[in-house]
Image (spheres, helix red, strand yellow):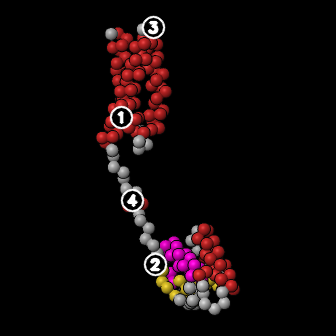
């Protein structure tokens, strides 16, 4: 299959076994963006042909290079080599499809920062445990029910945030520390109330 610019429109020319046929890029599964870029390129080729009579200048070089880029995109979309016919010089070159890296090679798992993460989790744990137990001690002096109520309110307030942060790379460490602090707050509550 060959990419041509004819009469200010892009066409792909190929042999179907019986005759040579021209195919409009819009009729292929190339995507609307690529087809529009091909037609825009063909209109620019027509404008360069009209303005540069004779030897192609800088504009011709840019148009030729853009055509090769578009041919590469077409080859990649179709998954096979495409011949590119330079509209200004008539030179034919074969453009190979660009191999796209697979999704697994593209996404490398990030290393887990255990030391930093556990340090952040420890500080979150200490802060939350001290805050919950301190609040429970202060309110339990007034009424034991207020001590239990404070733990319920703090737990109910923090659980949605912990749940949302559990899979976020940095915030998951804060979520682990906060959850451990809440657990220690509940474990320490009977000692505060009956101690």
- First-in-chain label (4 vs 3): 4
Q: What residue do we see at 45% from left, 30% from top?
A: 159
In front of the other: 131 or 101 = 131
Disc 4 and disc 1: Cα gap in Å? 30 Å
Looking at the rendering, the stretch of residues picked out in magenta corresponds to 60-83
State the SS at label 3.
loop
What residue does disc 1 label? 121
State the SS at label 1.
helix
Q: What residue do we see at 50% from left, 76% from top?
A: 72
State the SS at label 2.
loop
Q: Tell whether position 63 is magenta.
A: yes
Q: Nearer the viewer, mark 2 or mark 1?
A: 1
- First-in-chain label (1 vs 3): 1
What residue does disc 2 label? 96
Residue 9 visible in the picture:
no
Measuring from the top left, give residue 129's x and y in whole percent: 37, 24
Disc 2 and disc 3: Cα gap in Å? 79 Å
Q: Point out the residue furthest to the front here.
A: 58
Q: Is disc 2 in contact with disc 3, using a CB cutoff of under 8 Å?
A: no
Q: Quadrant of the C terminus?
A: top left
In front of the other: 162 or 43 = 43
In front of the other: 118 or 105 = 118
Characterize the local packing of mark 3: few (<14), some (14-19) or many (20 or more) Cα atoms within 10 angstroms.
few
- First-in-chain label (4 vs 1): 4
Q: Is residue 13 left or right of residue 114?
A: right
Disc 4 and disc 2: Cα gap in Å? 23 Å
Residue 58 visible in the picture:
yes
Q: Nearer the viewer, mark 4 or mark 1?
A: 1
What residue does disc 3 label? 142
Q: Point out the residue furthest to the top here.
A: 142
What residue does disc 4 label? 104
């Amino acid at each position: 299959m060959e990419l041509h610019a004819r009469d200010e429109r892009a066409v792909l020319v190929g042999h179907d076994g019986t005759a040579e046929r021209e195919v409009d890029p819009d009729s292929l599964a190339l995507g609307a963006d690529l087809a529009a870029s091909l037609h825009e390129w063909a209109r620019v080729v027509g404008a360069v042909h009209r303005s540069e009579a004779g030897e192609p200048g800088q504009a011709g070089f840019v148009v030729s290079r853009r055509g090769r880029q578009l041919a590469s995109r077409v080859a990649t979309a179709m998954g096979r080599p495409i011949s590119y016919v330079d509209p200004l010089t008539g030179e034919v070159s074969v453009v190979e499809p660009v191999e796209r890296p697979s999704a697994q090679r593209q996404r490398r798992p990030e290393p887990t920062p255990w030391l930093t993460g556990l340090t952040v989790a420890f500080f979150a744990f200490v802060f939350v445990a001290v805050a919950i137990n301190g609040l429970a001690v202060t309110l339990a002096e007034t009424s034991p029910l207020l001590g239990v109520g404070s733990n319920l309110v703090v737990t109910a307030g923090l659980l949605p945030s912990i749940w949302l942060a559990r899979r976020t790379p940095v915030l998951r460490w804060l979520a682990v520390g906060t959850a451990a602090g809440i657990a220690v707050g509940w474990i320490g509550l009977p000692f505060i109330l009956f101690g």
